[in-house]
Amino acid sequence: MPTNNLSVPGIIGIAILVILVLAIIVRNIYVVQQSRAYVVERLGAFHSVWGVGLHLKVPFIERVVKKVSLKEQVADFDPQPVITKDNVTMQIDTVIYFQITDPKLYTYGVEYPMNAIENLTATTLRNIIGELELDQSLTSRDTINAKMRAILDEATDPWGIKVNRVELKNILPPREIQNAMEKQMKAERERRESILQAEGEKASKILVAEGEKQSAILKADAAKQAKIMAAEAEAASIMKVQQALADAMRMLNENAPNDQVIKLKALEAFQKAADGKATKIIIPSEIQGLAGLAASAKTLLEDDKPEQNQ
């Protein structure tokens, strides 16, 4: 009589088959992360590029050929020997910042893309440096970087790569050139030091001269002010004397003096003049008569004094 119950080996076989199917399905489920892309082939030909998200690959028919990072990447290449226009050999190493913009071209465009970029960088650097002399090579980094970036960016477009920046990391000339450059730099520093010292001495002398000039101006101004003040004092003194004489004359006029008083005043004035250092004094005739009268009166008074004493 047939039974509907499966045998144990049949159950085990079905379970193994289910497990295998689930394993195959799980193994063909892909989760593409941010800033990444997967290049997928179907039966050996390019099929699609998977972006961010969940994807299911057809087993045994499709395969993920390449997992590409879309982030900006940095490639530091070893130093390369280059020769300048004036036949100086230098060692220069470069750093390139690039980004993969087309995963398909990056996968199928060139074999070993990084090796291709390194060789292209070396040849481009030799071509650019070969057109420059040593001094230009050492002082034109920005120009060299810009030229290399433009050339490399254009050359890597078919590879799905965009070159964002190119930097010359180190430029190492021969040792004898380095020694000569160090001596030149030392001489330049000494020259600048001498110039600075000379400029300092010049500025110091200018300041001293300016100080002496200001001092002389201040002294002259002080002497001028002193003379002005002395002149003003003398003028004030003269004015006071003249004012006193004017006041005296005004008082005399107000008191209406007679001729005798005026003559006596004149006599007193000439007596004071005679007390000075003048050797000759001219006395008017009118005052001479008064002077004789005064002398006679004085003699009489002196003669009367002895008789009274007796």
Image: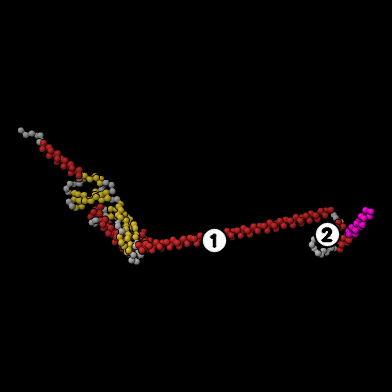
Residue 81 in magenta stretch: no
Pointer 1 residue: 205
User: Of helix, strand and loop, which mostly describes the magenta segment?
Assistant: helix
| Disc nearest the viewer among 1 and 2 | 1
Q: What's the distance in space between the residues labelled 1 and 2, CA to CA? A: 66 Å
Q: How is the image coloured?
A: secondary structure
Q: Quadrant of the N terminus?
A: top left
- SS class, disc 2: helix
Residue 51 visible, this angle: yes
Q: Position of residue 217 (x, y in %)?
A: 61, 59
Residue 306 in magenta stretch: yes
Give, as a single range, the part of the protein colored magenta.
294-310
Residue type of the residue flagged with mark 2: Gln
Pointer 2 residue: 271
Q: Residue furthest bottom?
A: 86
The residue sitting at 87% across, 60% down in the picture is 291
Q: Position of residue 246 (x, y in %)?
A: 78, 56
